[in-house]
Image (tube, rainbow, N blue to C red):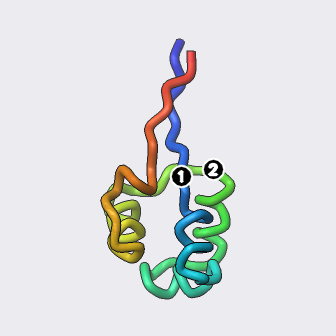
Amino acid sequence: MDKRRLENRIHVFRAEKRWSQQQLADRVGVSRQTIASLEANKYNPSLLLAQDIAEAFEVDIYSVFTHLKEE
């Protein structure tokens, strides 16, 4: 059985922009806890949230999120 998950680089892009988790959360309309959970890979974001995050960083969605397949 294969498992699928998303890796993300949210913390990297936040560091480049010098944004706190709260600042990113405010930009995309979620809680700081949501951003913290995403960065910790506790769950995958909805497609809409993933797109909002990528747009906040002014990059394409594939720059922030990478689909990994574990065997």
Cα distance in 3D space between marks 2 and 1: 8 Å
Q: How many labels does the image show?
A: 2
Horizontal and vertical percent position of residue 10: 55, 63
Q: Kindly report which numbered mark, 2 or 1, lies closer to the viewer in this rendering.
A: 1
Residue for point 39% across, 60% down: 50
- Tag 2 residue: 41
Q: Left or right: 58 with respect to 7?
A: left
Amino acid under disc 1: Asn
Q: Please give the label number shown on residue 8.
A: 1
Q: Name which quarter of the figure residue 57 lies in.
A: bottom left
Which secondary structure, mark 2? Answer: loop
Question: Mark 1 packing: few (<14 Cα in 10 Å), some, or many (20+)?
Answer: many
Residue for point 50% across, 42% down: 6
Horizontal and vertical percent position of residue 47: 34, 56
Which secondary structure, mark 1? Answer: strand
Amino acid under disc 2: Asn
Residue 25 versus residue 9 in the image, above or below: below
Residue 4 versus residue 63 in the image, above or below: above
Mark found first going from the N terminus, 2 or 1:
1
Confirm or deny contact between disc 2 and disc 1 (CB under 8 A).
Answer: yes
Residue for point 53% across, 12% down: 1
Q: Please give the label number shown on residue 56.
A: none
Question: Mark 2 packing: few (<14 Cα in 10 Å), some, or many (20+)?
Answer: some
Horizontal and vertical percent position of residue 69: 49, 25
Q: Left or right: 35 with respect to 62?
A: right
Residue 48 versus residue 62 in the image, above or below: below
Horizontal and vertical percent position of residue 62: 36, 50
Instruction: Name the residue nearer the viewer: 51 or 9.
Output: 9
